[in-house]
């Protein structure tokens, strides 16, 4: 069965590109709901889309940098791995449920590989493999094979490429994606701004989905999002 994928919303993309081309401002601005693309659309970095955000054809040498697809020149890059947590060779008892483990490992990896050029598709696959090991170790300790583990149930010991990490997770901010200016609840913008004054790497949970994210201040670092559950 072939599922029809709608293209991205031109108005939303145009609004986002217009903002990105404006000179940097000293004040932050909350997201606009007009940026949202329809829920059944492909992500703006999907390889199924023939063109990137700047309207340039994908899979060409001038829209590639190392193993990255260039989405917006000098602003946004994307990369896909080849291994998914639902791959058949993972333990069937946890298969498809290891995403939290992968996100923890992604934060650990980001603390080591701080330059954009250090990231490869093989590194993304290694994060999934080690995330599976970390999640299974956490399940074995808790013996909750029939449940999805939460942050408080994950092991404090995590390994990645022979490096041992001590994992500490805590709730730093809570709110809504959008909130009224006078609301006592944080918007996503406010929560992220608050987070980055205190931490570098974390996990975002929204609408039963999680993402790893962070910031590297190295010469060619920057902000990143990591998602191991998306299919392309």
Image (cartoon, rainbow, N blue to C red):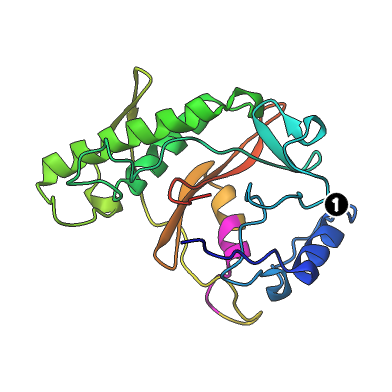
Q: Secondary structure at mark 1?
A: loop
The quadrant where residue 217 appears: top right
Quadrant hosting residue 191: bottom right
Q: Residue furthest top?
A: 162
Q: Position of residue 128 (x, y in %)?
A: 38, 36
- Look at mark 1 in the image and give the residue it sits on: 24
Left or right: where 32 falls relative to 102: right
Residue 73, given in percent of the width and then of the height, sits at: 81, 41
Residue 231 picture location, percent across and down: 48, 50
- Say if 177 sits above or below 154 in the image: below
Whether residue 2 is visible to the viewer of this picture, yes or no, is yes
Residue drawn at the location 30% of the way across and 46% of the way down: 98
Residue drawn where x is 24% and y is 53% of the image: 149
From what the image shows, is residue 141 above or below residue 23? Answer: above
Q: Is 83 on the left-hand or right-hand side of 21? A: left
Is residue 166 visible to the viewer in this orientation of the structure?
Answer: no
The residue positioned 38% from the left and 20% from the top of the image is: 161
Can you name the residue that lies furthest to the left here? 143
- Label 1: how many Cα within 10 Å (few below 14, some 14–19, many 20+): few
Q: Which residues are magenta?
A: 184-192
Give whichever of 184, 207 is nearer the camera. Answer: 207
Q: On the picture, is 162 further left or further right than 186?
A: left
Farthest residue, direction front = 1
């Amino acid at each position: 069965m072939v599922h029809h994928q709608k293209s991205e919303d031109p108005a939303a993309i145009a609004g986002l590109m217009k903002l990105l081309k404006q000179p940097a401002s000293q004040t932050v601005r909350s997201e606009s709901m007009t940026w949202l693309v329809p829920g059944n659309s492909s992500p703006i970095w999907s390889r199924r889309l023939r063109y990137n955000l700047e309207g340039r054809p994908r899979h060409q040498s001038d829209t590639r940098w190392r193993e990255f697809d260039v989405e917006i020149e000098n602003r946004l890059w994307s990369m896909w791995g080849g291994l998914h947590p639902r791959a058949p060779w993972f333990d069937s008892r946890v298969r498809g449920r290891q995403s939290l483990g992968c996100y923890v490992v992604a934060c650990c990896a980001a603390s080591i590989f701080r330059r954009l050029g250090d990231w490869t598709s093989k590194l993304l696959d290694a994060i999934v493999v080690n995330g599976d090991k970390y999640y299974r170790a956490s399940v074995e300790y808790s013996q909750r094979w029939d449940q999805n583990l939460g942050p408080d149930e994950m092991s404090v010991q995590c390994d990645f490429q022979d490096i041992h990490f001590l994992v500490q997770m805590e709730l730093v901010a809570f709110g809504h994606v959008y909130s009224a200016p006078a609301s006592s609840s944080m918007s996503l913008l406010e929560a992220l701004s608050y987070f980055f004054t205190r931490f570098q790497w974390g996990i975002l949970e929204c609408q039963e989905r999680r993402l790893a994210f962070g910031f590297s201040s190295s010469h060619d670092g920057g902000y990143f999002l990591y998602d191991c559950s998306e299919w392309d």
